[in-house]
Image (spheres, grey):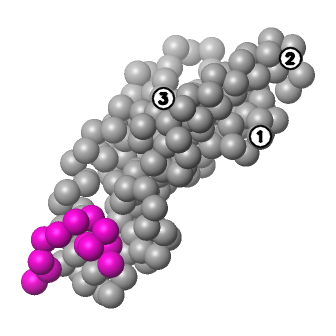
Amino acid sequence: MTDVGSDATLLAGVGAGDLGALRELYDRHAPWLSVRLARRCNDREAVADALQDTFVAVWRKPTGFHGDGEVAAWIWGIAVRRLVSRLRGRRDVIVSAEPPEPASVPAAEEQVLVAVEYGDVGQAMARLSPQMRAVIQVVVLDGLTAKEAARLLHIPESTVKTRLSRAKAQLRATLAEGVV
């Protein structure tokens, strides 16, 4: 039986093959992860699959967490990437003269995530420096606060705010020019 401890202690247990440690991490984090993912995608199946994929990834590579920042922020990063990956392959956009049925219309969040990945916004983001792109991804797309982003990215909170402001200005300018 796993001794309930900090997330970092539990993650170390996962690294040692302790299934109980993984179960405890899941019990701690799955509820809030599920809620946050559901805010980005109204497809319960996609959210459930992304959540499952997240903890499979944690089980397979707990050494992906390097000890700086919070385990919860690291897990959230995995979860949101898994959700985007799940949505990326979907082709449920309807092209028809008939009005689409409500169940077949992708959620607004799904459309935004796909557009960010493949549309003008994605191309504009590709023109950002890696540092500014990382801040946009974790604050705007993943919904982390500046404080959470600072911990995740290992930079001061003021740097997150500065990069976010500059990145938004650069994105606005790029999209306004239509250079993408």
How far apart in space, not on screen, are marks 1 and 2 (Cα)? 19 Å
Element type where label 2 sits in the image: loop
Q: Amino acid at mark 1?
A: Ser
Mark seen at residue 178? 2
For marks 1 and 3, the one nearer the N-term is 3
Q: Is residue 108 visible?
A: yes
Specify the amino acid type for callout 2: Gly
Residue at the spot of label 1: 129
> Does the magenta run of residues contain 49?
no
Number of numbered tags placed on the structure image: 3
Q: Nearer the viewer, residue 45 or 40?
A: 40
- Nearer-N-terminus badge (3/2): 3
Per the rendered image, the range of residues in magenta is 1-12
Q: Are marks 3 and 2 in contact (CB under 8 Å)?
A: no
Residue 26, image x and y in percent?
24, 62
Q: In the image, 125: left or right of 91?
A: right
Q: Residues within 10 Å of mark 1 (few under 14, many from 20)?
A: few
User: In whole angstroms, how far apart are the C-alphas of marks 1 and 3?
Assistant: 25 Å
Q: CA distance from mark 3 to mark 2?
A: 23 Å
In this rendering, the label closer to the viewer, 1 or 2: 1
Question: Measuring 18% from the left and 78% from the top, which residue is drawn there?
Answer: 20
The residue pinned by badge 3 equals 109
Residue ID at (71%, 18%): 169
- Which residue shows up at 56% across the image and 15% down it? 98
